[in-house]
Amino acid sequence: MNALYWVAFVIALLLLIAINAALVGLAMRFRRRRGREPRRLRTRGRTQLLAAGVLSLFAAALFVVGVIFTENASEVEASGPDGLQAAVGKTAQRDIELPAAGEPVPLTIQASGQQWIWRYEYPEGPFSYYELVVPADTAVVLELESTDVVHRWWVPGLAAKVEAVPGQSNRTWFKVNSGELEDDPPSDCPDEFTPVACFDGASYAFSGAAYATMRTRVRVLEPDSYREWHKRQADQIEAAQTYVQQRIASGAAGSGQP
Amino acid sequence: MSQEPALSPHRPELVTRGLPPPRPRWLQLAISSDHKDVGRIFIGAALGFLVIGLVEFVLMRLQLIVPQNDLIDSVTFNRLLSVWGPTMLLLFALPLVIGLFTYLVPLQIGARATAFPRLGSLALWLFLIGGAVLYASFSYTPPESGTLGLPPLSDDIAFISNNGVDVWITAVGLVVLGLVLQAVNLVVTTRRMRAPGLAWRRMAPFSFSASVCGWLLIALGPLMLAALTMLQIDRQFDGVFFEAGEGGAPLYYQHLAWLFFTGAYLVMVVSAVGVVSEVLPTFSGKPLLSRGAIAASMVAIAVLGTLAWMQNMFSASIPIGWLYFAMAAALLLVVPLGLVFLNWLATLFSGAVSLRAPMLFALAAISTLSFGLVGELAQSLIPVSWLLADTTGATADTGYVLVGGPVLAGFAALHYWFPKLCGRTMGEGLARLSVLLILVGAHLTFIPMGLAGLDGQPVDVYRFYDVGDLDLYNALSTIGALVLAGGIIVSIVNAAVSVRGGVRAGPDPWGGETLEWFALSPPPPHNFDVVPDVRSAEPMRDIREAIAARPAEEARPTPAPAGEERSERGEPVA
């Protein structure tokens, strides 16, 4: 995806230089002077058709390149040998192509946008807010939905931007290869479980008053650390729920609470 | 009564008991259905709304000058944003374009009025009332649902319970209705009111673009009206058009709204093509290289651009086949746009370029449009759009087109036709300063904005966080916005001063080749004493040659007001 961005950037830059250099050059070269009459040029239709043909070929080439890159980006890579080997996975997929049978199943995480925070739900129950914790070298499929208004999930450097719309499920995927990382995680990334990398992201659809604060972070852990984190998160949630239920049962949590 | 003359009973009869007392000037203007009065008010009001929109833009940029700034709180920022969006697009850009069309198209095609003068008057007042409704909301609750008003945020009372969204719906609806009505007027005028001999193939590019833009608005404006109606039913009358889970879909509104906003974007582009294609030949001393190719390109831009509406929705949950269709249409736009640019450059080739104010604005418009359109081309590739869409990178691209189209090409039109509007020319010195400031300001605003988008700054946020180089980009962008706003204000001041203080101009100050230069400056209410027969695409050239061919004692300059001495080019003799 980033490769195509740079290809497009270079093409755009060349086009801009060509147009603007020609514009300034021609306007300077052909300034009105005494004793020079403007030449009333005419073109034939064939010249215009030829130009249109060349431009059509350019558009067609761009289209082919665009389709190839889109198809590549939609195809979920298999998890690496060091990645988390998830046991269960869903198969009813749309628009993104999952690896063939026999290969490791990607880790599927449900993401839900709500005003104004992202909620992530991991396999087997645990969930987290704001921060998405994923294992390295593992293909992660994110299933997005929204509980209220339209949100858009994007973490620069990771995946494609996708919309979270109420009543519709949408998906994207990404995979962080620990071998390809150049920088250490930034200093504001929590040290717990020694993360391999941290990415900042946000919501990209206007969603009301606190829209700008609806941010997210992806913390990438080694697969073993991820399992530890996953277990601790599950335990802590269970402990918290048990505690709340006990309080309710003893009538201490205030009346009227379900 | 004196003795009545013996006339046939079938002759029209004029009976009066003395002249009615003259109405005050403002009342005369307000109820006038003369296309020139309607056009002047459209243009003047659009420029006024531009100033208001600039103030809002500068305020929002000042809030974004440093990370996590507390100058403006989130709700106030969102209100500024939600008012600024419709102001720039629907109260400035489209009305300026429509106003120029309304004033000039009848003059360019040798007509004495538009086809439906009263419809023009109605359109003008719908637009003005729409603007007033939007800004009246500052006395109670301004809208805060964003520039697009996307449901479910806008259509469910639970999310925004105040009346702001209703104001937004009402104001946008009134303005769009007005613009659609005037579009009908323009389309019928260009079809039915042309002077004898003025075939489509001889039509001036600007009038042709009026027809294309008119069709765009007729086709796509009602979709927005439908979307707004459904939104209001959802909001106030328990409708479920855009509500998921009850048979509706939020995505439905996105399709309708993007169709309209794509159409509005195309109106900005096509009208700019029309303006530049008039100014460029006049100040190059030679005809447009291929008016046929330019006209065909305008139609192609309108059709392909409309089909590419989903280019804005690549992140939505739409089957990939439809996204490829949108990508194909958006990429194919490179053919007509490329032809337009090539023909423009070829028109400059071996011409006699004179860099007067309108030409400077037109050249600046070409350059600025190239940035916006090339950026949009890159974003038509789905994977690039997955990165840049809904970041400030996308805002920067649209900003380039807004500045290149309605602002620079619009100002080129304003400088070019100001003699026809007011009988005076605008000051050259201020015009040069304005072009320079707008160009510097636009690049300083939009290039850092694009880079910030690549670093992941979301669109329309009221604050940003210090990630990467975002603080530098945003500071530069705010400085650029101040320069840009300054440059635009210089031109508006120039126009305001020149209405009364500009150098007097004759009917044909630039040596233009189209029919509007045959009329006086400013034209009388009936435009032309004699409607000329058109025999070529350059009627004024034919008229000048015919006058030159006359015997000497008969030869007179092109119709200038009696009593004023004029040179051959219509400029006052010193």
Image (cartoon, helix red, strand yellow):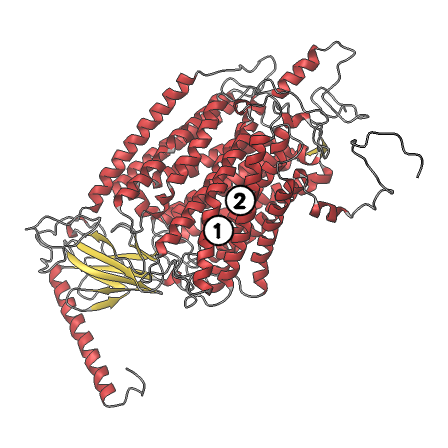
Report the residue at 45% width, 46% height from top.
B260
Give coordinates of residue B176: x percent, y percent. 52, 48
Report the residue at 65% width, 38% height from top.
B35
Q: Amino acid at mark 1?
A: Leu
- Outermost residue, top side: B551
- C-alpha separation, residue under disc 2 versus residue under disc 1: 10 Å
Image mark for residue B406:
none
Residue at the disc numbered 2? B180
Q: Amino acid at mark 2?
A: Val
Q: Specify which label sits upstream in the sequence, 2 or 1.
A: 2
Name above or below for residue A158 compared with residue B198: below
- Outermost residue, left side: A102
The N terminus of chain B is located in which quarter? top right
For mark 1, give the secondary structure: helix
Q: Is residue A157 left or right of residue B507?
A: left
Question: Foreground residue, B192 or B75?
Answer: B192
Report the residue at 54% width, 55% height from top.
B171
Residue at the disc numbered 1? B225
Other-residue count near label 1 (Cα within 10 Å), few / some / many at <14 / 14–19 / ≥20: many
Q: Are marks 2 and 1 in contact (CB under 8 Å)?
A: yes
The C terminus of chain B is located in which quarter? top right
